[in-house]
Image (cartoon, rainbow, N blue to C red):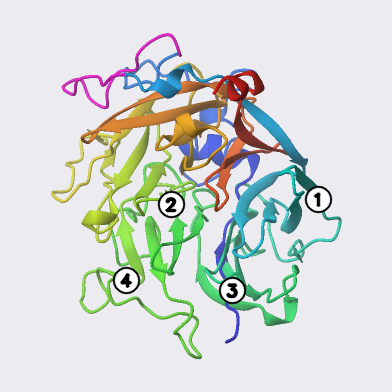
Amino acid sequence: MKPRLLLSLMVATSLFAASCSGSSSDGSSSSLPDEQATSDPSNDSEEEGEGVSEPEDSPPPTNPEVPEIEKPLWMDLHLVLTPIAELVEPIAFSPRSGVDDLYIGERAGIVRLIERSFKKNGTERISLSSRPVLDLTEMVSVEGEGGLLGLAFSTDGRFMFVSYTDLGGDLVVDEYLVGRGTRAEAETRREILRVPQPFTNHNGGQLALGTDGFLYIGIGDGGGSYDPESNGQDPLTLLGTVVRVDTFTAGDEAYAIPAGNPFSDQDGGAPEVFLWGVRNPWRFSFDQETGDLWLPDIGQDTTEEVNFLPAATGGGRGTNLGWGTVEGHLPLDGAAAPSDHHAPIYVYSHEKGRCSITGGFVYRGDLVPGLDGAYIFGDYCSGEIFGLHQVDGVANAWPLSISSPGNQLVSFGQTFDGEIYVLQLDGQLLRIEQAPEEREDS
């Protein structure tokens, strides 16, 4: 089978802050919300919202009518961020089945290999290979919010997918054969998807393999402020959607349409579309244990949101998350929420320096057993890292005892053993662990 090119969009340092608010109507992006100075990443919004509280306070629920839930036991855990490697603007992360190695995408267009091995006593050895797995720097544009944005492997580990913004500003997804080696074979490149971008922001670019083996691709609304082209509520376009494609039964085509896609055999939407109504879905993920889809969406002026889409009810298939008419729970500029709007499970406001959600993963590892089942995410501007806990569909989030520098928390990653990694644009790759003294006591 020929490998296929996966759609990739590069998120620059400005991507996260500019994506949450402050982008001009012509699509140009500022480095921070409302073009404020780097010393003050907050947007100084005077509007009240459902903010994530400081550690000593219980956060308000997702709306005033929902009661608070009891704080989880993991609130008392002392966590640390353990340095793993130093790279250049790491932005995308993927494990590969069959090996313990980690693959990291750097914004400029280079995929790096971190080799991991274990001694008989369990001691981990980590080495950053000097030889790139793949070098796309001559194909990738890092202008504005562009760059290498997404990275994933097929379930058998044979094919690597990358998403990026090309020199013309399009979002592109490529597939490469990796085979038994560690390097992508450049001559096997095949383009899977190309999505023209009307503006330079809101590229999306997240890539993930679902439990069904299909490739999921997050695509922003095309940019500009307030969805100027009304893409979010138009499933006929791929902008403002998460698409799902089958890259392995397509024959000579770039991809096939999974039979379960909501518009696979009917009018009303593009056959690739799995769900729609998103602004800039940055770093969605599937729970390794349940298959549930967790999808954050970066807000416009006031609100960041987390969407929970259980596998038992379709995992988001055919879901309208409301963007273009709704920000969080509230109608946008007097617009009416669509009748099929699926409300987020959790929202927080742009207070205390917060401005742009960085989506993460449900923790399923062994290094911090007390975190099991918590959804870990962060805010790009404030650098805070949160844990979300839900009981019977009611969710609250609390800051954990770890954080990242402001304007650096660009992404999270997860290995097959359930451990969660933190990617910072200053070059740091770190892993969430329990403090040594607490590991000894547990």
Asked if one can make out residue 44 in the rendered structure from this viewpoint, the answer is yes
Q: Amino acid at mark 3?
A: Leu
Looking at the rendering, in which quadrant would you find the N terminus?
bottom right
Q: Earlier in the sequence, mark 3 or mark 1?
A: 3
Q: Are marks 3 and 1 in contact (CB under 8 Å)?
A: no
Mark identifier at residue 128: 1
Question: Where residue 243 sits: x, y (%)?
Answer: 39, 64
Magenta segment boundaries in residue numbering? 55-70
Frontmost residue, 274 versus 229: 274
Q: Secondary structure at mark 2?
A: loop
Q: Secondary structure at mark 4?
A: loop
Q: Are marks 2 and 4 in contact (CB under 8 Å)?
A: no
Q: Earlier in the sequence, mark 2 or mark 4?
A: 4
Residue at the location (62% across, 65% down)? 98
Considering only vertical position in the picture, is 42 above or below 241? above
**What residue is pinned by disc 2?**
288
**What residue is pinned by disc 4?**
270
The crowd level at tag 1 (other Cα within 10 Å; few <14, some 14-19, many 20+) is: some
Asked if one can make out residue 24 in the rendered structure from this viewpoint, the answer is no
In the current view of this chain or complex, which residue is farthest to the front?
121
Looking at the rendering, in which quadrant would you find the C terminus?
top right
Report, in whole angstroms, how far the alpha carbon at label 3 lies from the one at label 1.
26 Å
Mark identifier at residue 5: 3
Report, in whole angstroms, how far the alpha carbon at label 3 lies from the one at label 2.
26 Å
In the current view of this chain or complex, which residue is farthest to the right?
130
